[in-house]
Image: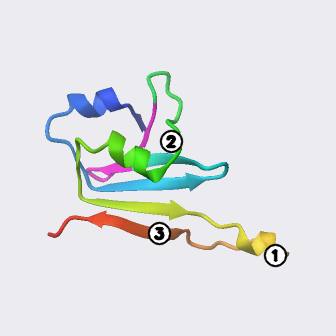
Amino acid sequence: MRITLDELRRTQDTVIDLLEILSLEGQHYMARLSIDGQLFLLSDKSGSTSLFRSAWQIQDTLAAFAIRETQVVHASAYHEMVGMAPAQIEPLRIRVQRQKT
């Protein structure tokens, strides 16, 4: 599902359980939000995925919201790059922030 910043602002007391900053090719990043067990892609008003130039830009954009945990997620095509058969490899996850519970 998709959600815009305006939609996030309209919901009262929204808590983002997990902000995943997805690293894409071409030095772009997108935000995937887990809210009450549902996943949302941060999008613009026209329904296109919002792209950012850095992880910091995403964090600055969402700074007004309560975020329990933030992770940078980077999928790797290393196997294919070195001539090995493609394999299902879990993406690298780097915890940037996490609230104490």
Q: Nearer the viewer, residue 45 or 27?
A: 27
Which span is picked out in magenta? 33-43
Q: Earlier in the sequence, mark 2 or mark 3?
A: 2
Per the image, label 3 sits on a secondary structure element best described as strand
Quadrant in the rendering for residue 75: bottom right
Q: Are marks 2 and 1 in contact (CB under 8 Å)?
A: no
- Percent of width and height locating residue 92: 53, 70
Residue 39 in view, yes or no: no
Q: Are marks 3 and 1 in contact (CB under 8 Å)?
A: no
Alpha-carbon span between mark 2 and mark 1: 29 Å
Alpha-carbon span between mark 3 and mark 1: 22 Å
Q: Which residue is mark 2?
A: 52
Q: Amino acid at mark 1?
A: Val
Asked whether residue 36 is drawn in magenta, I would say: yes
Q: Where is 29 relative to 42, above or below? A: below
Mark 2 or 1, closer to the camera: 2
Q: Amino acid at mark 2?
A: Phe
Q: Earlier in the sequence, mark 3 or mark 1?
A: 1
Q: Amino acid at mark 3?
A: Arg
Alpha-carbon span between mark 2 and mark 3: 18 Å
Asked whether residue 40 is drawn in magenta, I would say: yes
Q: Residues within 10 Å of mark 2 (few under 14, many from 20)?
A: some
- Percent of width and height locating residue 52: 50, 41
User: Which circle marks residue 71 in the picture?
Assistant: none
Quadrant in the rendering for residue 61: top left
Q: Where is 55 relative to 40, above or below? A: below
Per the image, label 1 sits on a secondary structure element best described as loop
- 50 left or right, relative to 27: left
Mark 2 or 3, closer to the camera: 2
Residue 26 in view, yes or no: yes
Q: Quadrant of the N terminus?
A: top left
